[in-house]
Image (cartoon, rainbow, N blue to C red):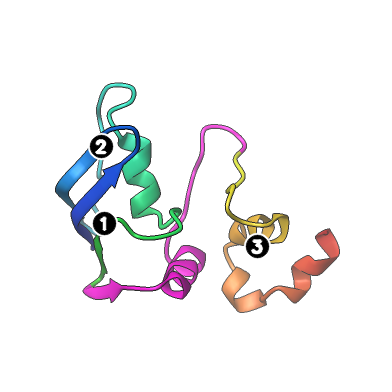
């Protein structure tokens, strides 16, 4: 279960003000909305892609507080399927390659050093 509460995200205008969402393990969770309503913004928050959290984040009852928690959860527990080729802007080339491996936590960085 992933539960976000007190979601507060603004750009030129407020996108989320004290919003909350709970995603249940094993269930299909769907985000539907008009273009520009904040779907991608919310997915970035859920997927720990932002540099800092804009919410109170519980991952199976464990509160995530610092950025090292984000990297570990992204690497082990969160997967992505994009419509098109995608690179994470905040990650290095090496981190983008490692992030796509299902076994990157087990294999570590050494196997991927030869790619770069």
* Residue nearest the observer in this picture, 24 or 45: 45
Which numbered circle lies on residue 26? 1
Q: CA distance from mark 3 to mark 2?
A: 31 Å
Residue drawn at (65%, 61%) of the image: 95
Image depth: mark 2 or mark 1 in front: 2
Residue under pointer 3: 98
Which residue in the protein does label 2 denote? 15
- Assign the N terminus to one quadrant of the image: bottom left
> Where 43 sits versus 25, above or below?
above
Q: Which residues are magenta?
A: 61-85
Q: Does 90 appear above or below 10?
A: below
Query: Secondary structure beneath disc 2?
Result: strand
**Quarter residue 66 falls in:** bottom left
In the image shown, does 87 or 12 lie closer to the viewer? 12
**Residue 87 is drawn in which quadrant?**
top right
Is residue 113 magenta-colored?
Answer: no
Quadrant of the drawing holding the C terminus:
bottom right
Residue 74 in the image: state x and y as whole percent: 47, 63
Earlier-in-chain disc, 2 versus 1: 2
């Amino acid at each position: 279960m992933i539960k976000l509460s007190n979601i507060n995200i603004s750009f030129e205008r407020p996108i989320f003000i004290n919003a909350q969402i709970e995603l249940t393990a094993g269930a299909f969770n769907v985000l539907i909305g008009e273009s520009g309503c904040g779907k991608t913004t919310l997915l970035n928050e859920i997927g720990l892609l932002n540099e800092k959290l804009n919410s109170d984040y519980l991952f199976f009852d464990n509160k995530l507080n610092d950025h090292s928690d984000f990297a570990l959860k992204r690497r082990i527990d969160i997967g992505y399927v994009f419509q098109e080729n995608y690179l994470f802007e905040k990650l290095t080339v090496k981190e983008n390659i490692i992030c796509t491996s299902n076994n990157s936590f087990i294999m570590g960085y050494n196997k991927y050093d030869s790619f770069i």
